[in-house]
Amino acid sequence: MKISPLQFNHIVKVLDQMLRFESPSDVILSNWFREHRQLGSTDRHAIAEACFTCLRRLETLRALCAPKKPNSRNVLLAAMAKLWGTNLKECGDGLKEDEKIWLADVKGRAMPDGLAQRAELPQWVIDRMSDQDEDSILELGRGLMQSAPLDLRVNTLKGRRDEVLSRLIADGFDATVTPYSPLGIRLKGKPAINKHILFMQGVIEVQDEGSQLLGLITGARRSEMVVDFCAGAGGKTMLLGAQMHNSGRLYAFDVSEKRLSNLKPRLARSGLSNVHPTLIAHENDTRVKRLAGKAQRVLVDAPCSGMGTLRRNPDLKYRQSPDSVAELNVKQASILASASRMVAVGGRLVYATCSLLPQENMEIVNAFLAAHPDFSLVPASAVLAEMKIPLDTGDVLQLNPAIHQTDGFFAAVMTRNAATAAE
Ligand SMILES: C[S@@+](CC[C@H](N)C(=O)[O-])C[C@H]1O[C@@H](n2cnc3c(N)ncnc32)[C@H](O)[C@@H]1O
């Protein structure tokens, strides 16, 4: 990677903010670009690419910085010397004498070979993946270092995938169908698809294929009552509404007014009129109680550490911690228990996250099932096979970026058992 002196100076300043891990790195970057409108697209691209690579490779870069402080300048210099083989004369304000000596030493050193550095995952994350061997952690870590493709979902209320695909190819996009989701199209590169007429007309939405599978596995059908418990800005809500053919009632619950208000324009574009965005104060809100035993499908897309989305948000691995995950675990268990009350006898409950940590996934599900004998696990492989989706990850859906080229998602499908619920 080639970096101009101007870009170097910007990267050091942006990275300095990012390395505090006080706010999301993509927000820091867009604020920076807003404040520095003179930067052209080539500079912006180089700055973004360099900052995100430094975040992705931070375990290695921090180790290479030692004994110097891993501040933004040193991290960037280590990346230039060791990852990109850049000519160090390109540094903005020139190298200081001690930096020259240090970098000559860095250049001659072997790459750090601890698992944390090879997998680019903090040690606390590795410690929590005790269900996986070293090779799997390494494969996963490397998958999370790749950049994510741009996946689209075709809104079946407004279009057919084969027709949308032909249109996108005719318009010059490098587009293919996604391997698992029957609704997905994958685009190469990062085209500005939100300016395309099909996007503006609500025929397509941007949605990772893994997220599409979480919506699909919920199995929503025409005329049902369905609850998307943690709907956010409605990525999965819109898929569920289309699966329901815009009929029945689809509640989109969330505690965030801002996220629900972001859902509104998306709904307008999608043509859905069966969605009821509902702000709740907390998971035990009276609105939840009013729907007790009434919903055929409840999707709990729980708030989580986001460890499965490191391809897009590499800073998350440093913005989360063992304490924040433990806090999330309490919330996840409470949300799942409360949401489960809405499931009708014979209905389906899906617990999902975009995390790879067993503490946020199987451990939450196992504890829930142990405390709720009226629910049982339905093998995800069977649900997917019934939908003719060629994907078998066993009893639960576990998507791995290294294997499936999606974000790292988890989903467990459960059903409310008629016999025990009646007891
Ligand atoms: C993983 S995000 C949802 C993403 C969304 N389903 C999508 O597909 O775009 C988790 C959501 O849970 C919401 N949330 C957090 N605590 C909640 C609670 N107690 N009850 C309901 N939703 C909650 C957050 O506001 C956030 O929007």
Image (tube, helix red, strand yellow):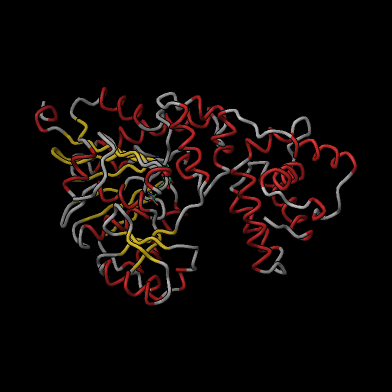
Quadrant position of residue 401: top left
Q: Nearer the viewer, residue 249 or 315?
A: 315
User: On screen, 370 above or below 215?
Assistant: above
Q: Quadrant of the C terminus?
A: top left
- Image side of residue 228 versus residue 105, left or right: left
- Image side of residue 43 versus residue 241, left or right: right
Where does ligand 1 appear, by image quarter?
top left
Q: Nearer the viewer, residue 103 or 29?
A: 103
Residue 140 locus on image (x, y percent):
46, 37
The residue drawn where x is 37% and y is 72% is 168
- Image side of residue 175 versus residue 45, left or right: left
Q: Quadrant of the N terminus?
A: bottom right
Residue 365 locus on image (x, y percent):
31, 30
Q: Nearer the viewer, residue 233 or 57?
A: 57
Q: Nearer the viewer, residue 148 or 254?
A: 148
The residue drawn where x is 39% and y is 70% is 199
Quadrant position of residue 315: top right
Residue 93 locus on image (x, y percent):
86, 54
- Residue lying at the far right of the rendered structure: 97
The residue drawn where x is 52% and y is 32% is 324
Residue 283 locus on image (x, y percent):
36, 39
The residue drawn where x is 60% and y is 33% is 117
